[in-house]
Amino acid sequence: MTSLILASIGVFLVVIILLVIILLVAKSYLSPSGEVTITMNGEQQLKTSQGGTLLGTFSANNVFLSSACGGKGSCGQCRCQVLEGGGEILPTETGFFSRKEQADHWRLGCQVKVKQDMSIKIDESILGVKEWECEVISNKNVATFIKEFIVALPPGEHM
């Protein structure tokens, strides 16, 4: 009886391992991989790996698009023009853009997947955005969905 149980456990483990191997092989063929080039404003180029969002790729390369929702596609602040390589606009994005803007290839950076070489146009003022590590002075709830968040900027920095 115990040999039957051990044999069953062995067969179960072999089947699970085979399924994991099949999934890993399928993932390697179906998931994007490799390096792509993102050209910003016709000048600056970023080399990055495929698979992430444009917002995440920019953030990893110290280009910070505003995104109050953290990349969930609900605030519409991470707007950029994807001139080449972005694919079609998604239904989650259409509410943020007029028909003319959609025809001019405006997209939300958090919704655009990096799958191929891309050409992006973003506002020049965004390229000067900085990231600071600050000391929190106060963090008060003013209303249900409103917070007053006061921080001390590092010495020599200003807004």
Image (cartoon, rainbow, N blue to C red):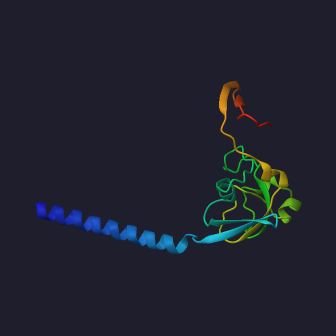
Q: Could one spot residue 147 in this view of the protein?
A: no
In this image, 143 relative to 3: left or right? Answer: right
Closer to the camera in the image, 159 or 36: 159
Picture quarter containing residue 101?
bottom right
> What residue occupies the far right of the structure in this picture?
100
Q: Could one spot residue 107 in this view of the protein?
A: yes
Closer to the camera in the image, 28 or 89: 28
Q: How many marks?
A: 0
Q: Is residue 42 above or below residue 76?
A: below
> What residue occupies the far front of the structure in this picture?
156
* Quadrant of the frame with the N terminus: bottom left
Picture quarter containing residue 108?
bottom right
* Quadrant of the frame with the C terminus: top right
Residue 132, image x, y percentages: 69, 41
In this image, 144 relative to 79: left or right? Answer: left
Residue 16, image x, y percentages: 33, 65
Residue 151, image x, y percentages: 70, 30
Query: Which residue is located at x 70 percent, y 51 percent?
Result: 73
Residue 47, image x, y percentages: 66, 67
Query: Which residue is located at x 76 percent, y 36 percent?
Result: 156
> What residue occupies the far bottom of the structure in this picture?
29
Closer to the camera in the image, 3 or 107: 107
Query: Which residue is located at x 62 percent, y 70 percent?
Result: 35
Query: Which residue is located at x 54 percent, y 72 percent?
Result: 30
